[in-house]
Image (cartoon, helix red, strand yellow):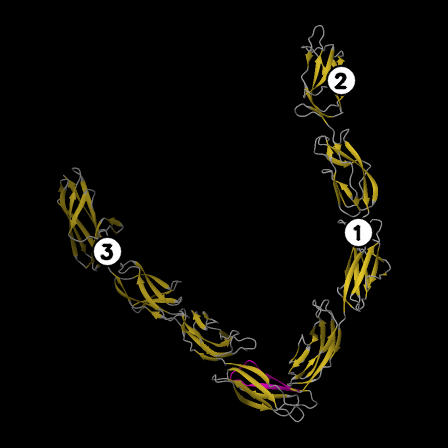
Amino acid sequence: MVGSDGRVTIDKGQRIRVDADVTDSEGRPLGGTVSFRAVNDDPNTASPDLGTVTLDGDGHASVTKDITEIGSFKVVVSYSGDRTHEPSVSDPVPLTVHSLPVITTGSLPSARFGSPYSQQLTAGGGTPPYTWRLVEGTSLAAGLELNGSTGVVSGTPTAVGTDFSTTFMVTDSLGGSDPRPGAGTRTILFNVGLAETQVVLEPSRSPAVAGQKMTVTAHVTEKNGGTAVPTGTINFATSADGVDFTFLDPIAVDSHGMAEISYTPGKTPYTMFEARYNGDTNNFPSDTARLTVRTVPALDVTWADLPAGTAGQSYPDTKVASPSGGSPNPDGTTSYTYSLATGTLPPGLTLDKTTGIISGTPTATGESTFTLTVSSDGSPQQSAPKDYELLINGTVTTLSASQNPAIAGREITLVAQVTTTGAHPPTGTVTFAYTEDPDGAGPQTALIGTATPDAAGLAKLPVTLAAGTHLITASYGGDPENPPGAPAATLSQIIVPALDVTWADLPAGTAGQSYPDTKVASPSGGSPNPDGTTSYTYSLATGTLPPGLTLDKTTGIISGTPTATGTTSFALLVSDNGTGAMQQQSAPHQASITVDKTTTGTKISSSANPAGPSQKITLTATVTGTNPTGSVTFKDGTTTIGTIPLNNSGQAGLLKTLTRGEHKITAVYSGDSRNTGSTADAFTQRVVSSDVKTTLTANPTSVTSGGTLTYTLTVTNNGPDTAHAVQAGLNPAPGITIKNTDRQTTGTPTTINGTTYPTAWNLSDLTPRQTITITITATATGKAKTKLTTTATAAPANPQTDTTTTNNTSKTTITIK
């Protein structure tokens, strides 16, 4: 192969061919001979002579040679020359000769059937890394495989055999996908031997119990990590003394490698077991496995007869059993535990688990069925059961109430149930009493009453108890056929306070106005919550509240803003929050709320007051209330001048032109479903006619630049009516500077009749024929012959009250000398 640097690479022993062409400078072939030689890069190593060859007619010569030396060479060709041409030498061609890879592993250790196996093949020479494979026609033992990258032979053999012949091949990194000629191979013989086995014995119990069947299981497995399951048989033997053995027939191994025998030990302290696996085609027989099992005595129990008892009387201490034998404790002693396996003892009786004694005072009559068990405390635990029926004779009283808890002030019934085991139903008397400590001086017993049992043994007593917890007793006094009931029956009777409610008077409301927060009731007492506190819930039992009002179920407060008038009737309900046994109490109440209309107010305003004789004005009536609707009627004195509906803002506007003079305007609101009607106070609307005339003069009318002059502003009302809120304004010509005036100015520019004047005066009202004169001192600056015109205007606040506006403005002109 030729590398990227032009170097030729071959294996040792591989044949190469070298070609040479010799020409002159013009490309014509030459004659003569050429010598081929491979020069070793190592001067201390021989350089192979490849031979000398005569050039043919085309100036060509070649040589073929098997290279047996390893190393780096340069192949050169030397031309001998002829009569007309000098000798010459070619450029060298690099040549590398590699060694071939060789398998150095001579043999592989034997494997065992079923045991994991792993061995590494090794190689030398060539150019690593190596690639491994099996030569076609050979194979490994069943269960094994060769890793082509690592050369590891691994797996778990699944068949036994000797002299498995396998030929391995290794190629180096230069081999490509196909091995080169001469790649290393080696044939290796391989053996798979029988697997070694072992047997483990395991008893079903240890120690064993004399006379009780047990089993012993033998489990055969392969050693050294083998996972195959052996087949075949196992031989068992047993011995009670370790000397004389009884040999059993061979037992086949199951699919798990197990075989089992059953055995019943005697009273000897120990039993010995032996087992040996007999082998199969893949497994050696095992060594003999041995097991010694200790034997403990069997539990023996003598059970006692249990005497009948009497309710209310001490039961005679009775030991239920006398055990012996059983499994001993580690210290060699034997102890026992007594227990109830099923059922229960009669109420009031107990079983001591250590002594096995039943004792106590039965509290109920009747027959109880149960199973007792005695167990030894050693290992393995041994147990013996015994079924019993125990009769308790006598009279027993139980006490209950028709309601518990109950409510103070309400009658309940105390019920005493008298039960007897005799043939005659109980008669006589049951006495009811309660025990309390009201003042802390000590418990005191008080009689509640007595009652006689009926045919069913029920004695009933109706009572009414105060709030609190009462410890009540019921005692049966007996009769000629039945003994008294002992002990007395007891009952903790809870009496909760009755719910008491003080209802509030509900005030009237006004539509559209916030209703005063009103708590509908003040409850007390009632059934408590589980934590002992008492809380209440408020609700509507029937009906609805007036629209816009709500009832808070926790606080009982009615609040909101009513939206409709009228009287609404409904039923309220207060309930405590007692649950379960603490029965809930409730109290209803019939109530009503009246919602009145909102009292309204009406006011009149005008878009212009005073107004002019021909001026259109808007008279506006504003109604205050709860979203008032409807209409407003306007009157001038007693004459109706218009009816206008209210808008969404509660206003009605009437557009009107009135005659000169004073008009007494009223507005009447008709009301609606939520609002009362109302009439506005009389509003005086003035319609006036004034005539404000303005005259402006200057003195002198001709001044030098920088000179002083005086303006006289005269305002006169020539009209028949007062001119209201008259304002006057002066607009000096450029070059005119106001120095002072004899009347206080507004201080700010003022707009009069649409024109803004930098200097202005408020003249208030001018009566007919009244004149106001204002004197203004100013200076004038400018070029000679310049004319400066100053303008003045005066008018009432409402220009439409001025009948002649053309005389509102006056101008005067001065000349600069």
Q: Amino acid at mark 3?
A: Pro
Whether pointer 1 and pointer 3 mark residues with C-beta atoms closer than 8 Å, the reply is: no
SS for tag 3? loop
Q: CA distance from mark 2 to mark 1?
A: 68 Å
- Residue at mark 3: 796
- Residue at mark 1: 197
Number of the front mark, 2 or 1: 1
Mark 2 or mark 3, earlier in chain:
2
- Compared to residue 200, the image places residue 398 above or below, namely below
Where is residue 116 drawn, in percent x and y?
75, 46
Where is residue 26 drawn, in percent x and y?
68, 10
Number of the front mark, 1 or 3: 1
Q: Amino acid at mark 2?
A: Val
Q: Please indicate, yes or no, whether residue 65 appears anywhere in the rendered image.
A: yes
Residue closest to the eye, 21 or 785:
21
Specify the farthest residue to the right. 249
User: In this rendering, would 686 be left or right of 242?
Assistant: left
For the record, the magenta segment spans: 396-419
Residue closest to the eye, 676 or 299:
299
- Residue at mark 2: 63
